[in-house]
Amino acid sequence: MKKTTKSTPKKSTAIQPVVIKDDKITKRISSAVKRAVKNIPDFPKKGVLFRDFTPILSNNKLFQQVIDGLYHVGKKFKFDTVIAPESRGFWFAIPLALRAKASFIPCRKPGKLPRKTLSESYTLEYGKNTLEIHKEDLKKGSRVLIIDDVLATGGTIKAIYKLIKKANAIPVGIVTLAELSFLPGRKVIEEELKVPFYTFIKY
């Protein structure tokens, strides 16, 4: 009689959803960030309330705590690459990439990158722009964590998401320091991008 052997089921390659819950570390950093951020009215144009995160950078102890907090949250996504838009996203993404021993991919405005690029247009809270990345730098299959300072309309994040997909990489998570909850950024992420999202503070 011919023996039958059970076939081993193939492992799923689908990304499992990651749910980030607040804990003592995230709550402590959220409070510290909220105290440090300066609110600047009518910048860069009338009617816009700008959230200034530079006080975090000038406080070396707080800056380190924020990077540690980003790593504490980000490591749950099992990323190997960090991507961020210029220039405020760079402030937090580059130190995080170093902390995590991950690659860093800069998203820049047109004409700033010298080699062949991928590009995607996006809408800001106060205007329009385009982001580009070096085509050869983001490797196929990379697990990419998107970092930015503030989530507003979701236009910047959506453009970065599309760049990641164009490079055949995997957007595994999005982390920002703050979210403007009266704008549709979270809705864009949840309904269109369907990528896990975490923010430290909400306005």
Image: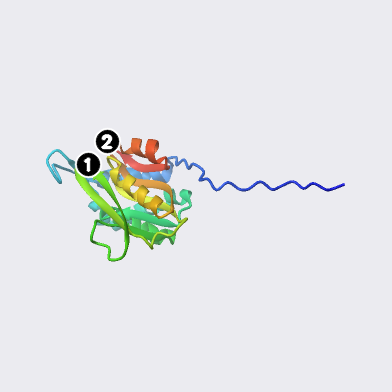
User: Which kind of residue does numbered mark 2 sit on?
Assistant: Leu
Q: Is residue 88 left or right of residue 17?
A: left
Q: Position of residue 154 (x, y in %)?
A: 30, 42
User: Quick check: 80 left or right of 40?
Assistant: right
Q: Residue sitting at 29 percent across and 58 percent down?
A: 60
Camera-nearest residue between 119 and 187: 119
**Marked residue nearer the N-terminal end (1 or 2):** 1
Residue 25 visible, this angle: yes
Instruction: Give the amino acid at mark 1.
Output: Glu
Task: Kindly tell me whether residue 56 is visible in this rendering.
Answer: no
Q: Position of residue 98 (x, y in %)?
A: 39, 62
Q: Which residue is mark 2?
A: 183
Give the image's coloring scheme: rainbow
How far across and how far down the image is residue 173, in percent? Answer: 42, 47
Residue under pointer 1: 125
Q: Position of residue 14 (x, y in %)?
A: 53, 45
Q: Residue at x 61, y 48 (%)?
A: 11
Q: Nearer the viewer, residue 194 or 34?
A: 194
Q: Quadrant of residue 138?
A: bottom left
Q: Quadrant of residue 194?
A: top left
46 versus 96 height, above or below: above
Residue lying furthest front: 2
